[in-house]
Image (cartoon, rainbow, N blue to C red):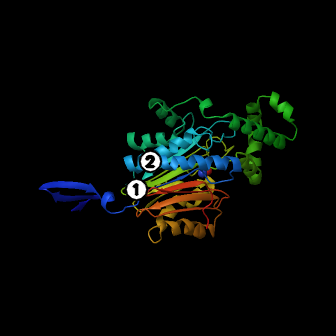
Amino acid sequence: MIWQNYIYFVHENKIRVTHLCGVIRIPQTIIIHGGAGYWREDRLMKALNFLKDLGEKSYKVLLEKGSLAAVEYAINKMEESPLFNAGRGGAPNLLGHVELDAGLMKSNGEAGFVASVKNVIYAISLAKIVMTETDHLMIVGEGAESLAKIKGLWVPENELLTNRTINLWRESVSGLLQVVSGQLSKERLAEDNILRRILDYYPHLVEFLRKNRAYLEKLQMKLGTGDTVGAVAFDGDELVAGTSTGGLFLKLPGRVGDTPLPGAGTFANEKGACSATGVGEDIIRVMLAKSAVDLTRNLSARDASREVFRILGEKFKIRAGIILIDQEGDWGIYHKTPKFPCVVVENGSLIIKDEWRE
Ligand code: GLY
């Protein structure tokens, strides 16, 4: 008899049980992405090496502990690494703070999301705590930080900022202030209290950034890294999607992207699981993750991952990438960004690439 993916049978007068995965070849797959975007070559190489090792380790966790544990493990490791835009090394906002978003969702509808949270490296674990230890689906800002304190996940901000991100922030904001004010020299700014200057010019900065998206995109490229990390997994039973991010470099404080919005940057149901990365505003507008999962009702995950960009792209600009897995264990990866480093481990075979558009 087969019940809930277990086979029950009689052998030597005893009832025995075995999991279907051991008998019928059910795919067990994990896909991990390090963020779509403008990767600088040297950082991209490091990210690919990192992802290869991470793919192997996360696959072991998948086999031993299942989809949820594997997704959390993979994302935690990227949050710890300053190579990626999540946790430590996350992109600072306009005021120089690292403000994180994260989301986790399972095929049975259980989910947890945190948004605009500071002083946490493992934002995905905080999202898991929201899912498993509260009655809520999403907790933001100070409330999320309080929860992080209670659960021992709170860290001082200097554990999130790196020399690289601080220097990039200082350099970029100095340049911005010079453009906006039209008067201050770099030397003068270095002496001044830069935060005070930002607040003095805040309305002008907001207006300038709104009207000059190309300027902001150039600054974004300086990060030399992707946007957001994520993973999706299928252990033969449960589908899980998770995503974690520092968000857009120099975003306005309090800005929330697609990552912690169910259906936008992170989504899973009984049909599929999807994690998105890219410009949050583009992704939210089209509910990219849910749209991709919905297409798996009629298409393979591979075709759905491409088709979702074709259909939605007719009307909207979608600067993003997705990883998608369906209930059969079929998977797809697609992106509309220059690079998208991802690793896939399917039944022990590993594929790693930085472009997935063929
Ligand atoms: N995709 C991450 C963000 O826009 O915040």
Q: Earlier in the sequence, mark 1 or mark 2?
A: 2
Q: Give the residue pinned by disc 2.
A: 70
CB at mark 2 closer than 8 A to ligand 1?
no
Q: Which mark is residue 107?
A: 1
Residue 343 position, x and y percent, is 54, 54
Closer to us: 275 or 248: 275
Quadrant that contains the N terminus: bottom left
Position of residue 292 relative to residue 156, above or below, is: below
Residue 351 position, x and y percent, is 54, 58
Residue 124 position, x and y percent, is 49, 43
Closer to us: 328 or 274: 328
Q: Residues within 10 Å of mark 2 (few under 14, many from 20)?
A: many
Quadrant of the image occupied by residue 150 = top left
Element carrying mark 2: helix
Q: Amino acid at mark 1?
A: Ser
Q: Among all residues in the image, which is located at the extreme left? A: 13
User: Measuring 57% from the left and 61% from the top, which residue is drawn there?
Assistant: 286
Q: Among all residues in the image, which is located at the extreme front? A: 12
Quadrant that contains the C terminus: bottom right
